[in-house]
Image (cartoon, rainbow, N blue to C red):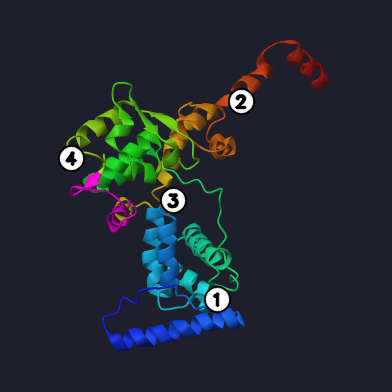
Amino acid sequence: MSESTKSTSKSEAQRYEEKRRREIREQYMLGVKPKRSWLEAEQRWLQEMDHKKSLETDIYHFEWLAKHLGRYQLCDINKEMLEKLAIAKEKEGRKAATINRIFCLVRAVLNRAHKKWEWLERVPVFPTRHVNNARIRWLTREEASRLLGCLPSHLRAMAKFTLNTGLRAGNIMGLQWSQINMANRNIIIHGDQSKNGKAFGVPLNREAIEILKAEMGRHHEFVFTYQGHRVRQCCTKAWRKALVRAGIENFRWHDLRHTWASWHVQGGTSLQELFELGGWKSFEMVLRYAHLSSSHLQEAADRLNGGGKFAERSLKVVR
């Protein structure tokens, strides 16, 4: 077996060689696993997961994690250290769901280091944060108008497009002209681009078409750009400042999708239609919006006033 030390110093290379020989001897003779760093694990993860749809999100999280775990060996990472990591993220104003997503990535890396790479004897217990999955936060049309007016032009176009299509942030940022059929007025979200792994079509209303026309000619591949480059982050400082100026609290970018869905239900769109429009994995996800409209129960309610046999029997019982 051979490996590069990536060192230009002969003495440094010799020290590294002695260290590696000692580690290998301990590994084979005593069953001691070689010590590997968090940064080594990050690098190997990225190499083996280059096919992953959410790899860019992993890279984004790794940049933050490197500042906190970069100087540690994998065997040094324990529950206490992970709890400090969660507290550090909370101090940045991040929500429980974001912290849990970061922990999911760390856990996946450590599990792989333990089970597949055999770099780690055991995986520590992970602290978790409680998440209220029933949360539905949406804007009134007046609030949405205020927010759009406070956003810079590139984020305004993206937010407005979300309010008209319900697309998730990743689909908005990665939207390509090749996915759009202006003649048929729809967008195709391919299976490798959707959260549930299934392709689906997104119809475009008049306002969405106008937004796309305004973006034409800015970039040859991507629809939404900033200073000639693809937008890779929605929840920027500019987004947070716009929320403050608009007087809107407790609102995330993903809540634009909730707003789109809420407006649909309030406008008379059936839950089945909304399910097909939004590309959800299960119908249960759409039931979160059922309380915003009772129109689907109107026919049942009207049976009491129908004057039929059911109404007559009910009246006799009441008398």
**Foreground: disc 3 or disc 4:** 3
Q: Which of 234 and 64 is in front in this view?
A: 64
Residue under the point 51% across and 76% down: 81
- Label 1 crowd bin: few (<14), some (14–19), many (20+), radius 10 Å: few
Q: What stretch is highlighted in magenta?
A: 225-242
Pinpoint residue 16: horizontal percent, then vertical percent.
38, 84
Tell me if residue 130 is in the magenta stretch. no
- Dot 1 amino acid type: Asn
Of the image marks 2 and 3, the number of the one nearer the N terminus? 3
Answer above or below: position of 47 versus 85: above
Left or right of 99 in this view: 7: left
Pinpoint residue 217: horizontal percent, then vertical percent.
17, 36
The residue that mark 1 highlights is 78
Q: Which mark is residue 297?
A: 2
- How many angstroms separate mark 1 from mark 4 (CA)? 48 Å
Residue under the point 69% across and 19% down: 304
Of the image marks 1 and 3, the number of the one nearer the N terminus? 3
- Label 2 crowd bin: few (<14), some (14–19), many (20+), radius 10 Å: few
Q: Which of 254 and 140 is in front in this view?
A: 254
Of the image marks 4 and 2, the number of the one nearer the N terminus? 4
